Amino acid sequence: MAINMSLFSVNAILLLSTDDSSRILTRYYSPPHIPHNAHGNDYPGANPYPTLKEQKAFEKGLLEKTAKQTSDVILYDNRVVVFKMESDVMLYVVGGADENEIMLYSVILALRDALNILLKNSVDKRTLIENYDLASLCIDEIVDDGIILETDPVVISNRVSRPPAQDAPNMQGIDLSEEGLLKIYQFGKQKLGERLRQGL
């Protein structure tokens, strides 16, 4: 049997509530391009649970199975699942049966630590729902389409909590007085006139 040499190592990231077994945030991944020789869901990184009904059944069974576990890594439904509990929330990272557990474990630790940094050590259901945008961006910074991008929680939290420097406009040295705005208007009018004379 050939070894799976795919970058698509994460099938799902789940944040589930332990109180009422509800979803807080779930992401199921599959590669954007299906291999030409693939049949069904037998290619590396394929989403094993394409419908909502299958996803909810998997999540319910997973919560029941992990409620009594003392370890952080289990094999469930022919998938390697690593998980951590934070207050009333279970964090899961799901990979294929032949996936590297240590790599998946580094993803779950990065997720837990980045959420602790972003939410100031208050990772619970209510806080996650109130800061859904931060949690969603945090997951997006860690995994994209099942490919692990980053596992350093400090880097992840920095990327999520502030915009990149090149995207934020430099407001230093801009004169927003009436005279400054008039100069900007005159400059724009002059450039537009030059472009029109040149024939665009």
Image (cartoon, helix red, strand yellow):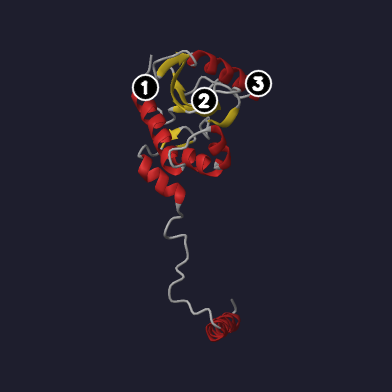
Q: Which type of secondary structure does the marked residue at label 2 adopt?
A: loop
Q: Position of residue 171 (x, y in %)?
A: 46, 70
Q: Mark on residue 53?
A: 3
Q: Nearer the viewer, residue 29 or 4?
A: 29
Q: Position of residue 18 (x, y in %)?
A: 55, 23
**Quarter that holds the C terminus:** bottom right
The residue that mark 1 highlights is: 101
Q: Earlier in the sequence, mark 3 or mark 2?
A: 2
Q: Position of residue 124 (x, y in %)?
A: 51, 33
Q: Is residue 51 left or right of residue 33?
A: right
Residues at marks 3 and 1, CA–CA distance in whole angstroms: 27 Å
* 26 w.r.t. 100: above or below: below
Instruction: Identify residue type, mark 2.
Output: Ala
Instruction: Identify residue type, mark 1.
Output: Glu
Q: Earlier in the sequence, mark 3 or mark 1?
A: 3
The residue that mark 2 highlights is: 46
Residues at marks 1 and 2, CA–CA distance in whole angstroms: 18 Å
**Quarter that holds the N terminus:** top left
Mark 3 or mark 2: which is in front?
Answer: 3
Q: Residues within 10 Å of mark 1 (few under 14, many from 20)?
A: some
* 146 w.r.t. 66: above or below: below
Q: Earlier in the sequence, mark 1 or mark 2?
A: 2
Q: Which type of secondary structure does the marked residue at label 1 adopt?
A: helix
* 200 w.r.t. 169: above or below: below
Instruction: Identify residue type, mark 3.
Output: Lys
Q: Residues within 10 Å of mark 3 (few under 14, many from 20)?
A: few
